Amino acid sequence: MLKGLHHIAILASGRAQTLAFYEALGFTVTETHVRPERSDEIIFMEQAGVVLEIFISAGNPPRVSYPEAYGLRHVAFRVEDVAAAREDLIRKGYAPQE
């Protein structure tokens, strides 16, 4: 029987940009695994009980937006104040969608 969410897996290409974004949301790196045989790195990050498993690699196809592709559409995080969280991301250089 399902007991809860274990982690969310995300594919990314830019290590520095990806870490900076999730660190801006308050996530911290808890574990890393470089896999030379697969030319990638797996980075686990955690914040408020949410675990992200981020695969950093090159060569994956870009995300198709229009029409949207099947698969994960988005990940939503619960925050105390949406407007304040949005402004904080903007101050840190990110442009959230409205």
Image (cartoon, grey):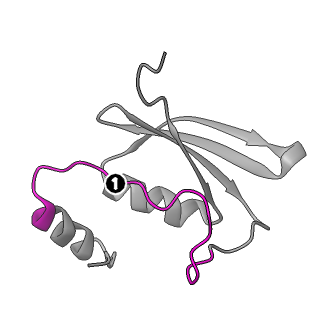
Q: Main secondary structure of the magenta part?
A: loop
Q: Which image quarter holds the C terminus? A: bottom left
User: Residue at 44% of width from left, 31% of height from top?
Assistant: 5
User: Residue at 70% of width from left, 47% of height from top?
Assistant: 41
The vertical placement of 33 against 86, above or below, is above
Q: Position of residue 36 (x, y in %)?
A: 85, 45
The vertical placement of 95 against 26, above or below, is below
Judged left or right of residue 68, residue 80 is left
Secondary structure found at label 1: loop
The vertical placement of 2 against 80, above or below, is above
The vertical placement of 79 against 89, above or below, is above
Q: Position of residue 47 (x, y in %)?
A: 34, 39
Number of numbered discs overlaid on the protein picture: 1
Which corner quadrant of the image does residue 97 belong to?
Answer: bottom left
Q: Does 88 appear in magenta? A: no
Which corner quadrant of the image does residue 72 belong to?
Answer: bottom right
Highlighted range, magenta: 64-84
Which corner quadrant of the image does residue 60 belong to?
Answer: bottom right
Outermost right residue: 37
Q: Amino acid at mark 1?
A: Ala
Outermost top residue: 1
User: Residue at 62% of width from left, 63% of height from top?
Assistant: 70
**Callout 1 crowding tier (Cα within 10 Å): few <14, some 14–19, many ≥20:** few
Instruction: Give whichever of 98, 67 is nearer the camera.
Output: 67
Q: Which residue is mark 1?
A: 76
Q: Does 70 appear in magenta? A: yes
Q: Position of residue 56 (x, y in %)?
A: 66, 55
Instruction: Give whichever of 19, 5 is nearer the camera.
Output: 5
User: Residue at 18% of width from left, 50% of height from top?
Assistant: 79
Q: Position of residue 6 (x, y in %)?
A: 48, 29
